[in-house]
């Protein structure tokens, strides 16, 4: 007999993983870029 | 293409293109996610779980697209010695790995209600997992080469060899018995209803813009690191 699963639990989990992972990657990449470019400018000024 | 071999020219383009791609991608992904969660109809057989399509399929395509980009950049690096090609290949590895991991996780979350199981060791799922391990291997190798000062041709060769997995992933559902459905979209047409097809194409465009924006941001970060290190080394030599 098939279990009665609430599909919405899986849908919400999938969107949380997908959007959360994507946003974390975008935010981390943006901050890493800003940090690296700031360091380059500091080295240039020295 | 060689016009952009100059890092200065590349940076002048990337400076305005990076935020544009990221903003456009965030807008499209948000819009298609709202559609997927609140407006897309439930599918006759799969019910509401079909909504996972708008995250799972674009990330699967971009997971494979990421490695294809690594292979092309590696070829350009090996054949034409394009100075930015190695940086582009390294920059594509992170979004490729993240999208592959998201594809596997969302596929598992879709598989449980649709197939009654989280995971099966069939051709499609296993070859996708192999792709994730290839990304990990590539990133570790590129990192080791940077740290130890080895030849950047080693990760480039790895990137080219690893591309053999891409047609295996694509054709796995046709070559072997699989619980995974065969492709619903091909160059010849689509088996999908328009209310799923067009939002899926828009979601793919949105995730692709984010992929492009992250690659540019990673390239700018890698380039800035190299330029800072070069300057510091030059100053240390002048002082000595």
Image (cartoon, coloured by chain):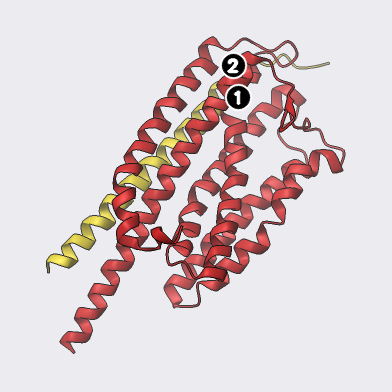
Measured Cα–Cα span from mark 2 to mark 1: 10 Å
Whether residue B40 is situated above or below residue A41 in the rendered picture: above
Is any part of residue B91 visible from this angle?
A: yes
The quadrant the C terminus of chain B occupies is bottom left
The answer to which image quadrant residue B103 occupies is top right
Q: Colour of chain A?
A: yellow
Report crowding for label 2: few under 14, some 14 to 19, many 20 or more residues within 10 A (C-alpha). some
Q: Answer with left or right where residue A44 lies relative to residue A8.
A: left
Task: Provide residue B80's location: percent of width, then percent of height.
Answer: 52, 69
Identify the residue at image location x=57%, y=26%. B201
Chain for numbered disc 2:
A
Chain for numbered disc 1:
B
Identify the residue at image location x=50%, y=58%. B89
Q: Nearer the viewer, residue B7 or A15?
A: B7
Is any part of residue A6 visible from this angle?
A: no
Whether residue B78 is situated above or below residue A38 in the rendered picture: below
The answer to which image quadrant residue B108 occupies is top right
In this view, the mark in front (2 or 1): 1
Disc 1 is placed on an element classified as helix
Q: Which residue is mark 1?
A: B52
Disc 2 is placed on an element classified as helix
Residue furthest left in the image: A46
Q: Which residue is mark 2?
A: A8
Task: Provide residue A46's location: percent of width, then percent of height.
Answer: 12, 69
The answer to which image quadrant residue B230 occupies is bottom left
């Amino acid at each position: 007999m098939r279990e009665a699963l609430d599909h919405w639990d899986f849908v919400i989990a999938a969107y949380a993983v997908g959007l959360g992972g994507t946003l974390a990657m975008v935010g981390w990449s943006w901050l890493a870029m800003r940090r690296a470019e700031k360091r380059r400018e500091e080295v240039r000024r020295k | 293409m060689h016009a952009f071999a100059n890092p200065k020219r590349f940076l002048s383009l990337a400076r305005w293109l990076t935020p544009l791609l990221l903003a456009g991608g965030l807008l499209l992904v948000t819009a298609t996610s709202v559609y997927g969660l609140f407006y897309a109809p439930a599918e006759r057989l799969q019910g509401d779980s079909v909504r996972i399509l708008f995250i799972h399929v674009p990330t699967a395509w971009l997971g494979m697209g990421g490695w294809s980009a690594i292979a092309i950049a590696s070829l350009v690096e090996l054949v034409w010695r394009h100075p930015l090609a190695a940086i582009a290949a390294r920059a594509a590895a992170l979004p490729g790995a993240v999208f592959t991991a998201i594809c596997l996780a969302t596929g598992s979350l879709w598989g449980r209600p649709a197939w009654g199981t989280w995971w099966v060791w069939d051709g499609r799922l296993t070859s996708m997992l192999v792709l994730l391990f290839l990304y990990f291997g590539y990133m570790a190798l590129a990192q080791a080469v940077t740290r130890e000062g080895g030849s950047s041709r080693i990760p480039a060769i790895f990137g080219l060899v690893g591309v053999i997995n891409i047609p295996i992933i694509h054709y796995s559902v046709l070559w072997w018995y699989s619980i995974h459905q065969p492709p619903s979209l091909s160059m010849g047409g689509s088996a999908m209803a328009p209310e799923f097809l067009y939002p899926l194409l828009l979601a793919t465009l949105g995730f692709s813009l984010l992929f492009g924006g992250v690659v540019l941001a990673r390239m700018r970060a890698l380039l800035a690191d190299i330029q800072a290190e070069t300057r510091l080394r030059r100053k240390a030599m002048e002082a000595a």
